[in-house]
Image (cartoon, coloured by chain):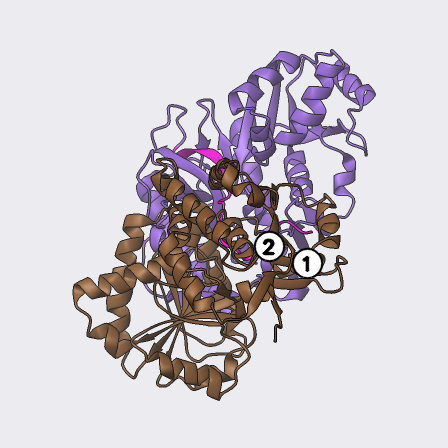
Chain colours: A purple, B brown
Amino acid sequence: MFSLESIIQTSPYALDKERKGSLYNEALHGLTEHHYQNCEPYRKLLNTLGYSPNKERGIAEMPFLPVRLFKEYDLRSVASDDTVKTMTSSGTSGQSVSKIYLDKTNAANQTKVLTKIVANYLGEKRMPMLVIDSPAVLKNRTMFSARGAGILGFSMFGNKVVYALDEEMRLDIAAVEAFYEQYKDQDVLLFGFTYMVWEYFYKALVRAEKQLLFANGTLIHGGGWKKLADEAVSNEAFKESLEKVCALKQVVNYYGMVEQTGSIFMECSEGHLHASIFSDVLVRRKDLSLCDFQERGLIEVISLLPSSYPGHILLSEDEGEILGEDDCPCGRLGKYFKVYGRIAEAEIRGCSDTHERQ
Amino acid sequence: MAPYNRLACDFLDELSQTLRASQEASMYPDVMSFAFWCRRGHIDTLRDQFEDSRVRLGVGLALHVAPGNVPINFAFSFAFGLLSGNANIVRVPTKPFPQVDLVCNVIKEILAKEQFQALQEMTSFVRYEHTNNATQEFSERSDARLVWGGNETIKAIRALPVPERCVDLTFADRYSFCVLDSASVEALEDKDLNRLAQGFFNDTYLMDQNACSSPHLVVWLGKNTDHAKAMFWQAVSALVAEKYELEAVQAVDKYTQLCRNAIELENIKDVDWADTGVFRVGLRELDKNVDELRGQCGYFYECDLEELSPLAEIINPTYQTLTYFGVDKEKLQELVCSNRVRGIDRIVPVGMGLDIGVIWDGYDVVRSLSRIIDLR
């Protein structure tokens, strides 16, 4: 099977289309074969859909799993004894959550790859870090939520980590101001989930009429725009608003999902999301054929990390478009793209339920 | 009033004419088919079929709880209540459908005319949230209730107290399937094949395959069915490509369901998902619980049978409509009656699956909503 060791020393945006293509051809065949041998539901699925793992096929023809399957089935390619961590998506109570089973290798690779990718933006040096979340998120270390995993992953870049919110998700003004006084002139990292940053940090600062001018600060945030889209807050508006209250050297959004933790897609100075050598992205039409570049469609995400669960090729429920490949002005190689957000719910006709009880 | 009384028939005819002359209504095929249904010629036929020289009157006040996601169903339910001679309270969907407002406005205008004053006093259209206890209050005064909807809705409404003699007609969640004779399909000329495909399309895609009468399963009769299948599905695919707008989320839903089926089902023979408009899952044999496999937006299960008889083993009370092509309806009647199966209330040719009428879900709705005065 493909081993991540072979590329972990490579610079994360150093492979052009051709070199990445041949790497992925081999790696994805290896991963698919591995999961086929070790995950029974995955094997059944491939058999039924008519994929034979040995057959030569391009990346676009490789079998992709709807991301929802991880909410409905226990999909793992390792024995349960070897599972060291189970990660869950951050569904609100009542919603079903994805369950991702990690063995030691897979868990370690997530941390390694995240570090490689983020270092490309921040440098290797650790810095004071303000986590815009509550420390309560990390309470149970074996049942990991996506939020917890994100916080821990990014904490690799912090040498002094301070939480900005208390257990009730209220802004801890004292802690934040102490952090500010001590580090305001240094390089600092602010990290949080897009919605939390907006709702509990930005809004709270505005309400308190406070500014925290971290002129050398970088804010990294991710986790989806669904709630902010409801409030009609765009990426640009988010950036501008945050810069008003916090100054900040850069505000970096990232796109990623709990099913492919580690190999996140980070936004460059041009505002483009980038696939690193650890991940790739395809966009499909409604008929599941591939979109052209600059054509909007369903996002398929590919990651070389998932080895303990068959999550290496996933059909997301997000819409986006590929903007280009290997030619972003920021200099990073690989595909770059933008995300429009979740696909719209359809109004299904029919009489199978009235949705109106009594 | 008496069933099929003059006033009710006149009213429906005027409604039919007004809707059919309306520019706005012509945009909605469902409104047009309702308008066509209540034209005088058709209602006269129904009345002739109804006549049995008994003396009848409507039971009194009928409460209609229409389904939330089929816009025009409330109008049919109202027409049934009216034709049976009842006063009607019709709860329309809370969700705003232009069809509902359109039809309600036309009804209101016509009822305002002097000659329909008696009907006006007997008719109310209401709209309210499900948290409202109006259904309870209405139920306490109802002589009949027509409840359309999911099983949960029906359960909840059934639990509300009604007068002792109140008649409940409940239109529950049902399952429907289709039987095609492969030799007959193979023998079709292009034109007739397209007509069959169009009929199948109307039965399914017009309501996102989510109506109770839309088939989820296609049973192919015969020994060598491959050629017939290829012909038929190709014709359906072409229609779907031309006339059906599949949303991205529906494509993902269908693909997800395909993956679920692949993981869970043990009797899949083959799948065809080359065209996201038409997904097909071939089953090796029919399980008893095949009615739990439901497709949406063009997702079909298929099975080959050499004869009809195995169907008798699996049909349960959930089964509603059997649409057919190339099979003698007497044979289908025999399947249901000789085997005394507990399901299937409708056996209709492909294309008539969604044709709602006064006989529905096994009920003679007009007779059920009226009472006989035994006069000797």
Relative horizontal placement of residue A258, taking residue A94 as reference (left or right): left
Q: Is residue B1 above or below residue B303?
A: above
Front in this rendered view, residue B307 or B260? B307
Q: Position of residue A247 (x, y in %)?
A: 62, 13
Which residue matches tag 2? Answer: B86
User: Dots 2 and 1: beta carbons under 8 Å?
Assistant: yes
Q: Is residue B112 above or below residue A60?
A: above
Q: Is residue A347 magenta?
A: yes
Residue lying at the far front of the rendered structure: B376
Q: Position of residue B245 (x, y in %)?
A: 36, 46
Q: Are marks 2 and 1 on the same chain?
A: yes
- First in sequence, mark 2 or 1: give its number: 2
Residue lying at the far bottom of the rendered structure: B338
Residue at image location 65% in from the left, 15% down from the top: A246
How many marks can you see? 2
Residue B143 got which mark?
Answer: 1
Residue type, mark 1 in image:
Asp
How many other residues sit within 10 Å of disc 1, few (<14), some (14-19) or many (≥20)?
Answer: many
User: What's drawn in magenta, residue-wise?
Assistant: A333-358
Q: Alpha carbon of mark 2 to alpha carbon of mark 1: how far?
A: 9 Å
Relative horizontal placement of residue B190, taking residue A28 as reference (left or right): left
Chain of the residue under the numbered disc 2 shown in the image: B
Q: Position of residue B369 (x, y in %)?
A: 59, 62
Residue at image location 70% in from the left, 11% down from the top: A211
Can residue A103 be seen from the camera position used here?
A: yes
